[in-house]
Amino acid sequence: MEVPSFFDKMMINLRATCRYYTGYPKDLGPSRVIHFTSEREFVQLLHQGYPVVVAFTIKCNLTKHLDKVLEEAAVKFYPHVKVMRVECPKYPGFCITRQKKEYPFIEIFHSPEQAINRGRVADPNITKYSVQVLPFNYDVSTYGFREFLKHHGIQQSDPK
């Protein structure tokens, strides 16, 4: 068996004794962030009945912090809140429908309900739904997500 180095021993001791150690890398296990692939998959995710936090991003150095926050939030709120990341250059049609010009931005989709059909129906096989969309304007952190969800009355964990 390999003998731990001085640095490894120091880090183990620090983690064991310090109450407030929040250093990275955190072992979050497998990624819980869902990567957007199609609108159909997105609708199926909404029909599971859980709120979906959607981060509309572009791939750049500025979104590395956001990626870490999304990973941490996805693990913390799993399975009661789903976290999805949309790379807008890959899926411009979905991002353009949100009518935002600055990236990244975050929206929370929840409470899908079947919409009332008004007027004539073009295709009886198409079912329309209305979804409540909340723009996220809190601190981009796990704490910010928790406070936002609490403020809007969205369940984020098992009731105790």
Image (cartoon, grey):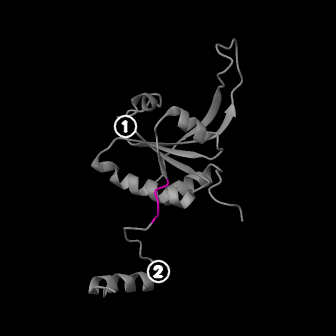
**Mark 2 vs 1, N-terminal side:** 2
Boundaries of the magenta span: 28-32
Mark 2 vs mark 1, CA separation in Å? 38 Å
> How dense is the environment of label 1, judged by Cα within 10 Å: few (below 14), some, or many (20 and up)?
few
User: In this picture, is 97 found above or below 37?
Assistant: above
From the top left corner, tell me how far across and down residue 135 is, in percent: 51, 41
In the rendered image, which residue does mark 2 sit on? 19
From the top left corner, tell me how far across and down residue 50 is, in percent: 63, 47
Per the image, label 1 sits on a secondary structure element best described as loop
User: In this picture, is 99 found above or below 28?
Assistant: above
Give the residue drawn at x 60%, y 55%: 79
Residue type, label 2: Arg
Q: How many marks?
A: 2
Quadrant occupied by the C terminus: bottom right
Residue type, label 1: Glu
Horizontal side of 130 relative to 1 (left or right) equals right
Give the residue drawn at x 33%, y 53%: 64
Give the residue drawn at x 38%, y 36%: 88
From the top left corner, tell me how far across and down residue 127 is, in percent: 66, 25
Per the image, label 2 sits on a secondary structure element best described as loop
* Residue located farthest toward the front when viewing the structure as drawn: 1
